[in-house]
Image (spheres, helix red, strand yellow):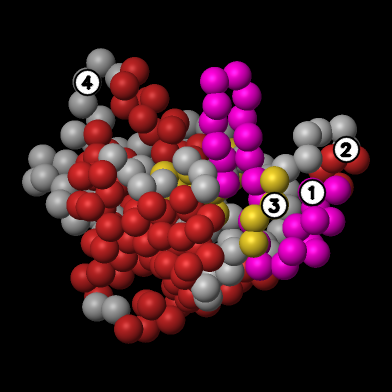
Amino acid sequence: SLQASTNKLTYAIAGRSRKKLDDLATSIERSGRRRPLVLEADSSDYNSLVTMARSCRCVASTVGPYLKYGRDLVKACVESETHYCDLTGEFPFVREMIETHHDRASRLGVKIVCSAGFDCVPIDICTMLAIDALPCEARSAFGLFTSCNGTASGGTLDSIGGIRDWAKRSSKSDLEDPYYLAPNASKHLRVDKKWTKMKGVSFSKDFMTPTVPHVMALVDNRVVRRSLALRN
C-alpha cells in the first residue's frame, strides 16, 4: 500500500505472515533504503483488508490467483474509498470487478486499475501513443515483443488454471468476444473481432524477423479495447 505526502512517499508492505513481512522489511532496510511500515492482512479475513485499505490512499496487489483471492480486496478498497491497482492477467476477474464495482467506484472517485503489470502495460500504452500520433483514425495495432527473461511463478500458473476453468463454464460468445472487458463499447469502436492474424511461426516483413503468437495476446487484446472504450 502507498500513501503519498507532499515531499515523500510513505509505503507499507502487507501480508498474512508478520515474520515474513518483518524479514522483508529488514532486508529492505539493510539494502540502504528506508524501512517500510508493516501491516498484517489476510485475503480470507475481510475486516483485516478493510483496516489495511483505510490506512492508505492506494493498494497495489501483486498476489494471485485473483479469481481465488482477489475479490474481497477490491471490495474493501471501494468501501474504504481507496484506490486499487494490480497486475492480473485474469480477464474474467477483471470483467467481474467491472460488473460489481465500476459504477460505484466511479461515483466515489475511486480508481480501480487492473492488469497494470509488464504483460499488459507496454502494448496498452504503445497502442495509445500510436493512435494519438496517427493523422488518421486507426483500425488495428500490431505489437512485436522481441525478448524477455524470467519464468512463470506458481501464482501465474494457478491463474492460468483459473482461466481454463472459467473457459469450461463459459459460452462461446464470451470466449471469442475481444470486447469482453468493454461490454458497453459503442458500435463505432467495434471495428473488428480479430485477435491476431498469426496462427503459428511466420515472418514479419515489417520488422524483418521470425514471429510466433504471443501467449498474452488473448489478454492484451481485451485490455487494449477496454482502455480504448474508457477514453472515448
How far apart, in angstroms, are the residues tagged by discs 4 and 2?
50 Å
Dot 1 or dot 4, earlier in sequence: 1
CB within 8 Å, label 1 to label 3: yes
Compare residues 52 and 169 and report the one nearer the observer. 52
Look at discs 1 and 3 and give the one toward the viewer. 3
Dot 3 or dot 4, earlier in sequence: 3
Q: Which residue is mark 3?
A: 38
Which secondary structure, mark 4? loop
Which secondary structure, mark 3? strand
Which image quadrant for residue 16?
bottom right
Q: Which residue is mark 4?
A: 136
Q: Residue furthest right?
A: 30
Residue type indicated by callout 3: Val
Which secondary structure, mark 2? loop
CB within 8 Å, label 4 to label 2: no
Dot 1 or dot 3, earlier in sequence: 1
Residue type indicated by callout 4: Cys
Q: Which residue is mark 1?
A: 25
Asked whether residue 218 appears in the rendered view, the answer is no
Which secondary structure, mark 1? helix
| Residue at the (24%, 62%) spot, across then down | 99
| Above or below 19: residue 225 | above
Look at discs 2 and 1 and give the one toward the viewer. 1
| Above or below 122: residue 164 | below
Q: Which residue is mark 2?
A: 31
Residue type indicated by callout 2: Ser
